[in-house]
Amino acid sequence: VQLQASGGGLVQTGASLRLSCAASGRTFTSYNMGWFRQAPAKEREFIAAVNWGGSGSIYYTNYADSAKGRFTISRDNAKNTVYLQMNGLKPEDTAVYYCAADRIQAMGPRGISPIGSWGQGTQVTVSS
């Protein structure tokens, strides 16, 4: 699957942004989808995931502690798109945000499996 992330930008502290990640392919509904970020001089870190429950339209969300209460991940299977709504942004949220997709491994702090895919990244900068 190919992923195209968008929606980043430069905002002030306390602002909101919604990131989008459009995926190609016809089996999007069974993909585990997630968002990660990488700040300068830091390792890439998990932010949020919406994982397929294994049957039908059941999905489970999972968040890093840094995202709980401020960020919301969602997906629109009709549009093959996953979103990350970010509210109450802080300067420490400044990073390149990457979306990811994986068919076999649930998205989380472990990252993605060898057959997972990364999007190209979108820059989010939060000024103080």
Image: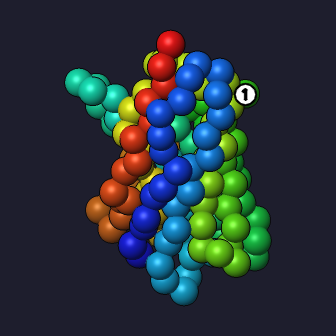
Q: Quadrant of residue 99?
A: bottom left
- The x and y percentages for residue 59 are 71, 60
- The x and y percentages for residue 37 are 41, 38
Q: Is residue 7 left or right of residue 17?
A: left
- The x and y percentages for residue 117 are 36, 64
Which residue is at a point 54% across and 86% down the rendered structure image?
26
State whether residue 100 appears in this view.
yes
Q: Residues within 10 Å of mark 1 (few under 14, many from 20)?
A: few
Which residue is at a point 65% across and 75% down the rendered structure image?
79
- The x and y percentages for residue 21 are 52, 61
Which residue is at a point 60% across and 67% down the rendered structure image?
81
The amino acid on which the numbered mark 1 sits, given as a three-letter code, is Gly
Mark 1 sits on what residue? 69
Which of the pair 21/56 is nearer the observer? 21
Q: Quadrant of residue 66?
A: top right
What is the residue that sits farthest to the left in this orientation? 41
Which of the pair 92/103 is nearer the observer? 92
